[in-house]
Image: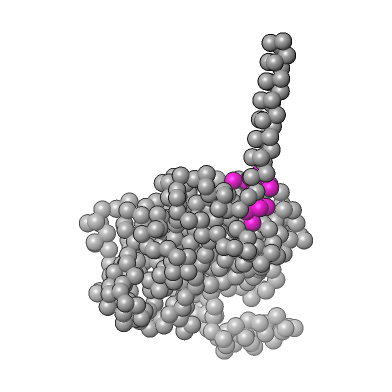
């Protein structure tokens, strides 16, 4: 009798455990609000009714190198391909599971104008996977990521790879329009005499003294073999305050304040992130790093508002989400120049600026320094224009996890010339 009762008891326990296990599996794909209840935080989730939850699964980047160093003989799509392959390796993502690829770049290589497509094919993605390239100055990969968010939120895609690449080691060098016309006409010239007659008005020594232009416009592919293994950034420059104070200004000499020490250096690098709907990510067994909750783009007059976009965009995204500056646990601002960061912090702390320029009753308020770019920023790590945005968002996700935070805010300015100074602020939430 005791044996029978014990067997019945064990059977009951087994049934309870199986039921509980089945419940856990079912609960795995519940909405964000339930998913976040497992966290120690009590803050609201910012989930929107009727809108898919969009998550950052993971992100990678190549080492950021000083332009003209180890990457010098590569091409932009080589770096982008390496980032994509790194993302595939990190996530174990099947290549055919990606619905779309979006990449950002600023200075385009004419041979690979759609670098997203070139890099995707090189990385082994299906030739049936669409890919396009965007450009928006220093927020180009931010634009790629928000494009991915839009595609997923609209129900067009479930898995999108976004990224950015910049290659400053080999920027296109343009000649005058007259010289370009002559060079193009040389392709049509039938004889040596005809070519010489086209070139006769030019002093060739003068025309080509500062570049390696070629009169042959046939294109070849580049095969990269025997490259050095690059495993870390090479632009970090430890220095004392006294050493930095001795550097000469780069502009408006001798009175300028922008020097090599307080500017982001010319950098080569690429980045990539995997963005998915939460439902798809959980179904594939991923544990997302963060939710991408909201974003705002702004544009300002470049005459006196240049690179002040973060000041304007930050309160807008907070108001949209019903948050305050004090709710944010992690801040990651792109650092174009130290002066740009200082100008934004001063503007954010100014009641006069808020009232005069922003139509506010009071100041925006500046982020506390103990939450601000604590793992280093563009000034120290480098700034491959179109790759920085993915670095910022991935850093926010990692900092939230490591520091136990709930909300992170990314802000980045971008040059806009006559269009105005553009900026993006993105709000992330711990997953």
Colour mapping used in the image:
one colour
Q: Is residue 130 in sight in this rendering?
A: yes
Chain part drawn in magenta:
277-287
Q: In this view, does 136 lie above or below 162?
A: below
Quadrant of the rendered structure where residue 81 is? Answer: bottom right
Residue at x 63%, y 45% (from the top left corner): 28
Could you say which is closer to the camera, residue 179 or residue 428? 428
Residue 354 lies, in percent from the top left, at: 32, 76
Residue at x 77%, y 61% (from the top left corner): 128
* 52 drawn magenta: no
Residue 199 lies, in percent from the top left, at: 61, 85
* 281 drawn magenta: yes
Q: In which quarter of the image is the N terminus?
A: top right
Q: Is residue 92 in sight in this rendering?
A: no
Query: What residue occupies the far right of the structure in this picture?
Result: 128
Residue 301 lies, in percent from the top left, at: 41, 83
Query: What residue occupies the far front of the structure in this picture?
Result: 1
Residue at x 71%, y 59% (from the top left corner): 99
In this rendering, position of residue 417 left or right of residue 2: left
Could you say which is closer to the camera, residue 324 or residue 55? 324
Q: In this view, does 418 lie above or below 151?
A: below
Residue at x 47%, y 75% (from the top left corner): 298
């Amino acid at each position: 009798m005791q044996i029978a009762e014990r067997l019945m008891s064990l059977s009951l326990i087994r049934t309870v455990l199986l039921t509980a296990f089945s419940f856990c599996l079912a609960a795995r794909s519940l909405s964000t609000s339930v998913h976040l209840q497992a966290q120690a935080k009590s803050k609201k989730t910012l989930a929107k009714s009727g809108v898919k939850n969009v998550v950052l699964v993971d992100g990678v980047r190549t080492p950021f190198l000083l332009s003209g160093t180890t990457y010098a003989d590569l091409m932009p799509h080589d770096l982008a391909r390496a980032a994509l392959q790194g993302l595939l390796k990190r996530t174990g993502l099947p290549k055919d599971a990606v619905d779309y690829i979006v990449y950002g770049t600023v200075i385009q290589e004419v041979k690979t104008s759609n670098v997203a497509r070139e890099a995707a094919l090189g990385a082994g993605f299906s030739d049936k996977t669409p890919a396009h390239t965007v450009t928006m100055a220093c927020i180009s990969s931010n634009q790629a990521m928000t494009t991915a968010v839009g595609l997923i939120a609209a129900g067009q895609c479930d898995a999108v790879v976004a990224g950015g690449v910049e290659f400053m080691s080999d920027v296109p060098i343009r000649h005058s329009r007259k010289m370009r016309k002559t060079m193009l006409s040389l392709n049509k010239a039938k004889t040596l005499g005809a070519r010489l007659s086209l070139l006769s008005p030019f002093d060739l020594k003068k025309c080509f003294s500062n570049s390696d232009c070629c009169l042959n416009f046939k294109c070849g592919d580049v095969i990269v073999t025997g490259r050095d293994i690059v495993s870390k950034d090479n632009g970090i420059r430890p220095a004392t305050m006294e050493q930095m104070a001795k550097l000469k200004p780069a502009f408006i000499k001798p009175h300028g304040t922008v020097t090599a020490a307080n500017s982001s250096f010319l950098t080569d690098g690429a980045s990539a992130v995997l963005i998915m709907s939460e439902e798809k990510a959980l179904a594939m067994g991923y544990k997302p790093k963060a939710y991408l909750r909201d974003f705002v783009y702004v544009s300002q007059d470049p005459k006196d508002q240049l690179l002040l976009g973060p000041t304007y965009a930050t309160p807008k995204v907070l108001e949209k989400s019903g948050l305050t500056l004090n709710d944010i646990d992690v801040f990651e601002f792109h650092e174009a120049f130290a002066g740009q960061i200082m100008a934004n912090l001063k503007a954010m702390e100014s009641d006069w600026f808020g009232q005069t320029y922003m139509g506010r009753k009071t100041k925006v308020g500046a982020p506390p320094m103990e939450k601000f770019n604590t793992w280093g920023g563009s000034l120290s790590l480098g700034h491959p224009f179109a790759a920085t945005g993915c670095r910022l968002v991935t850093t926010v996700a990692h900092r939230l996890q490591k520091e136990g935070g709930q909300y992170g805010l990314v802000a980045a300015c971008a040059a806009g010339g006559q269009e105005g100074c553009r900026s993006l602020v993105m709000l992330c939430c711990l997953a």
